[in-house]
Amino acid sequence: MQRWSIGVLTLIAFTLLLFPLSVQAQSDEAFIIYRQKLMRANGAHMGAIADILKKKLPYTDHIATHAQGIHLVSKLIADAFKKEITAGKTDAKPEIWQDWEKFTAAADAMGKESARLAEIAQSGDMQAIVAQVKKLGGTCGDCHKPFRKPKEESYKRQQ
């Protein structure tokens, strides 16, 4: 019986060596990097839509897919920002956590407008698409203005 207990303890100790405690307690930097990737994904989708429209690229049928991508990312934003982190290489303002309901409502609005863009894009009606892209872009600003540091205060300028 004692040998079995020592074997179990050895196995547990070996497992802990293989999987450091960092798996359980991630650094703030890891959360920040993940959040930034979500935001960059949205920016990439919005940029692609803008390129299609402004440069008259023959990919108008791609707009719905980009809008769906934004919609999917919008569902992750609130969860990704649950942990309050305002220090370090982040442009997140404390107002996110001070007005959590407004922040999550802004993410939800982006999700709603991006889903609507995906629907409208299926029609091929360019006037309606452009109008909806503007609405979607407005939701980005509705979140950036109150919850993201302005460019002059960005951590990127302080490096």
Image (cartoon, rainbow, N blue to C red):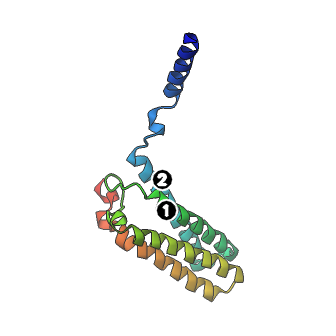
Q: Residue furthest front?
A: 1
Determine whether, in the image, residue 120 is placed left or right of residue 19: right
Which image quadrant for residue 27? Answer: top left
Residue 128 versus residue 154 in the image, above or below: below
| SS assignment at label 2 | helix
Front in this rendered view, residue 46 or 2: 2
Determine whether, in the image, residue 36 is placed left or right of residue 92: right
Residue 61 versus residue 34 in the image, above or below: below
Give the crowd class for mark 2: few <14, some 14-19, many >=20 residues within 10 Å. Answer: few
Give the crowd class for mark 1: few <14, some 14-19, many >=20 residues within 10 Å. Answer: some
Amino acid of disc 1: Ile
Image coords of residue 68 (percent x, y): 63, 69
Q: Residue furthest bottom?
A: 127
Please state, as top left, top right, bottom left or bottom right, where the N terminus lies in the image: top right
Image coords of residue 56 (percent x, y): 62, 79
Q: How many marks?
A: 2
Front in this rendered view, residue 82 or 29: 82
Determine whether, in the image, residue 99 is placed left or right of residue 108: left
Determine whether, in the image, residue 27 is placed left or right of residue 137: left
Q: Nearer the viewer, mark 2 or mark 1?
A: 1
Q: Say which residue appears at 66% left-offset and 73% top-offset.
A: 64
| SS assignment at label 1 | helix
Image coords of residue 133 (percent x, y): 55, 80
Which image quadrant for residue 145? Answer: bottom left
- Mark 2–mark 1 contact, CB under 8 Å? no
Residue 105 versus residue 23 in the image, above or below: below
Amino acid of disc 2: Tyr
Q: Say which residue appears at 57% left-offset and 11% top-offset.
A: 3
Q: Disc 2 designates what residue?
A: 34
Q: Disc 1 designates what residue?
A: 77
